[in-house]
Amino acid sequence: MKKILTISIALFLFSSLSFGQMSNTAIGLNGTFSIPIGDFNDVAKMGYGVSGSFFYNLSDFFQFTGTVGYLSWGGDKIEIGNTSIEAIEPATSIPILVGARYYLDDKELNPYLSGELGLHIFKSAATQTTDNGIELPKVKGDSNPYLGFGFGGGFVYELSNDIKVDGNLQYNIINAEEAIGHFALEIGFIVGI
C-alpha cells in the first residue's frame, strides 16, 4: 500500500507541474533493459522494466527531469557443495528520481549527459535453500527504501516538433546494505505537452 501511495503522490506532483508551463514541458515512456554488475551480478540475471518521465526545459541546453519506474531482475541459482540457494521470486525496484540533462547540441540528433538522484523502493528476491536434498523453509524478500543515484548519457532524435525518440545508457547505484549496481539501457519516446 505504501508503494502505491508513494507512486500516486509522485505522479500527482509531476502532473501538477506539467500544467504550469505547457510550452516547456514533455512526458516520456521508456522500456528498460538492466544488466546487474558487481556483487549484484552474482545473484541476479538481466532485468526488464518500464519508466515514465517528466521533462521541464530550463534553457535550450538544460532540462529538469522526474522519473518513476519499475524494474524486475530474475534470480540465479547458487550452489556451494551440497547446498543450493535459488531465487523463486524476482528482485524488484521502484525508482522515484529527480535529475537533469545537459544537451551538447541543438540539432535533429541531440546527444546529452544526464544524472539522477532519488529513492529506490527495493525488494530482494525470495529464495529457496536446499541442503543435501532437503528443502529448508522459503525466505521472503525484504522491501526497503534506499537512496540511489545514476549518471550516463544518450541521444534524442526529433521526429517532429512534439515527438522525439529517446535512447540512453545509465550507470546506477542503489545504496543498500551492500551496494546494488546495474547498467540501464532505455529506449522510448518523448511527447511535448
Image: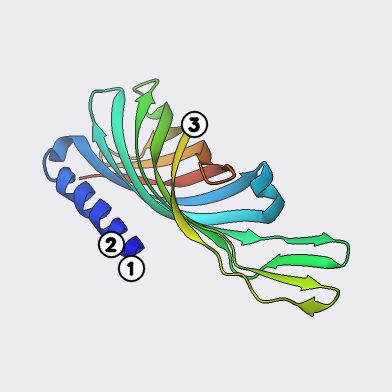
N-terminal-most mark, 2 or 3 = 2
Number of numbered labels in the structure image: 3
Q: Is residue 12 left or right of residue 123?
A: left
| Residue displayed at 54% across by 56% down | 48
Query: Rounded to the nearest whole Å, what is the CA distance between mark 2 and mark 3?
Result: 29 Å
| Residue displayed at 57% across by 49% down | 34
Against 78, residue 132 (above or below) is below
In the rendered image, the residue lying farthest to the right is 81
Residue receiving disc 1: 1
Q: Amino acid at mark 3?
A: Gly
Check contact, mark 2 vs mark 1: CB within 8 A.
Answer: yes
Tag of residue 5: 2
| Residue displayed at 58% across by 55% down | 47
**On the rendered image, what quadrant is the C terminus found in?**
top left
Query: In the rendering, at what x and y percent does residue 88 appear?
Result: 64, 70
Kind of element beneath mark 2:
helix
| Residue displayed at 35% across by 34% down | 99
Q: Amino acid at mark 2?
A: Leu
